[in-house]
Amino acid sequence: MQFQVRSIYLGDRTVNDLMMEASDETSLRAKLLSEGKTVLSVRELPNASNKAGLFSFFKTKKRESYPLFCRELRTLTQAGMSVVEAVDTLAARESVAKQVDTLPQDLLNQLQQGKALSTSLAGLPNSPPVLVAAVRAGERTSNLSEALNDYLRFDTLVEQLRRKVISASIYPALVSSLGFAISVFLLVVVMPNFASMYQNLRGGTSGTTAIIITISSFVNKYQFEVVIGVLLAITWFIWWIKTGRARQFAMRLANSIPYIRHKIDDFYIAMMYQTLALLLKGGYPMTEAMAVAGQSALSKEINISLKQALAKIEQGALVSQSLSNEHLCDEVGRRLMAAAERNGAFHVAADVVSNMHRERFELFVERLTRIIEPVLLMAVALLVGTIVVMMYLPIFDMTTRVR
């Protein structure tokens, strides 16, 4: 297995970026530690055993750079560097390696102006509000490493749920693509040959015989145009996916079905409570934590509901009742938050509620996958079978005429 390794000798503050072979990540880290190196990050390169990255096309460079930067910053600060020294080291490494990612250098420019790390992060484009809040909490408690750990655990949970959705969609996408490819092959290559055979058919035709002859004649006559049209359709479909319009359409379609919309809300609510757990653990009061969670909410509806619940809490209402009234928790969640009002362990209750909704969403994805797979197989089989039957029906019609 090949790995991309970032390591450092603390004596000269030089970050090394190497490609190394190893049987697994654990043995590679042990080898580097025995050589006196501090490991910043280890990333397995895509190969035959790791294809997940091929299907994560929607993940942007910016989204990937923040977690990676946090891991490296955590490692350097734990090794004894100050925040400015650690960021300066990472910026120097990016400059020497001529990397596209300018996050360390942009952050260093902010720090050199005397700003705090949280303020500097907030000034960067596309910085996650949860990360900014976690770092600010770490600055309050003088425990930046723990704050970075909390954020990385949060990011890992989000990525795990995203990967579950992607993995569940791979098989249906492959089946649909295969069915489409077979149908196009039959229409473009096979059916014109049948059309030339049916041109000498005498007498009138009706029903499916007339339809198949018309389609065959059209495809045979405009074969080049049909191929161009199919290629243009495929190009448009790829553009539709890449620009996010397919995702928007899928979300509108899913939201139009109450049951599916309710299950998607489980994902949003799980992320909301995970954010609350992270911030409350870092020392934020409930009102500030809810405000930050609203900024990072994945759904506009969740954001609006959080703002309404926050307004009620600021007026003196109970946290549990306010969240329940805005449909941000069920009866179990309400009772958990009510218990937290008595013992003060809001971050524990929020983490439990998050896990409940996450497990419901994962179960939904698993069940939906098991339903969609056989349905798609049947649909593709019916589509291809219908085309094949329509191709051969005229032969049966010709046999009837001969008799």
Image (spheres, rainbow, N blue to C red):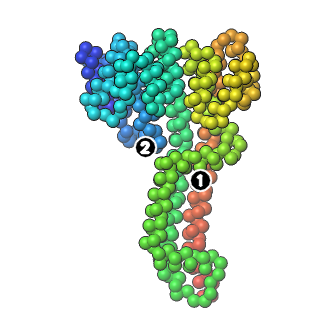
Looking at the picture, how far across and down is residue 80, in whole percent?
35, 11
Would you place residue 203 above or below residue 13 in this image?
A: below
Of the residues shown, which amino acid type is indicated by label 2?
Leu
Q: Quadrant of residue 271 in the image? A: top right
Q: In terms of depth relative to the viewer, which is nearer, 355 or 271?
A: 271
Which quadrant, please, contains the C terminus? Answer: bottom right
Looking at the picture, how far across and down is residue 246, in whole percent?
55, 49
Q: Is residue 350 left or right of residue 36?
A: right
Query: Which disc, if any, is residue 376?
Result: 1
Res. 183 visible in picture = yes
Depth check, mark 1 against mark 2: the one in front is 2
Q: Is residue 329 left or right of residue 172?
A: right
**What residue occupies the far front of the structure in this picture?**
113
How many labels, in total?
2
Res. 39 visible in picture = no
Q: Residues within 10 Å of mark 2 (few under 14, many from 20)?
A: few
Would you place residue 314 above or below residue 101 in this image?
A: above
Looking at the picture, how far across and down is residue 189, in whole percent?
46, 71
Q: In terms of depth relative to the viewer, which is nearer, 152 or 361?
A: 152
Q: In terms of depth relative to the viewer, which is nearer, 101 or 108?
A: 108
Q: Quadrant of residue 6 in the image? A: top left
Measuring 66% from the left and 32% from the top, which residue is drawn there? 304
Query: Which residue does the numbered mark 2 point to in the structure image?
Result: 54
Q: Is residue 374 left or right of residue 18?
A: right
Q: Is residue 208 left or right of residue 246?
A: right
Q: CA distance from mark 1 to mark 2?
A: 23 Å
Measuring 51% from the left and 37% from the top, which residue is drawn there? 163
Measuring 29% from the left and 26% from the top, which residue is drawn there? 93
Looking at the picture, how far across and down is residue 289, in whole percent?
60, 21
Would you place residue 374 above or below residue 144 in this image?
A: below
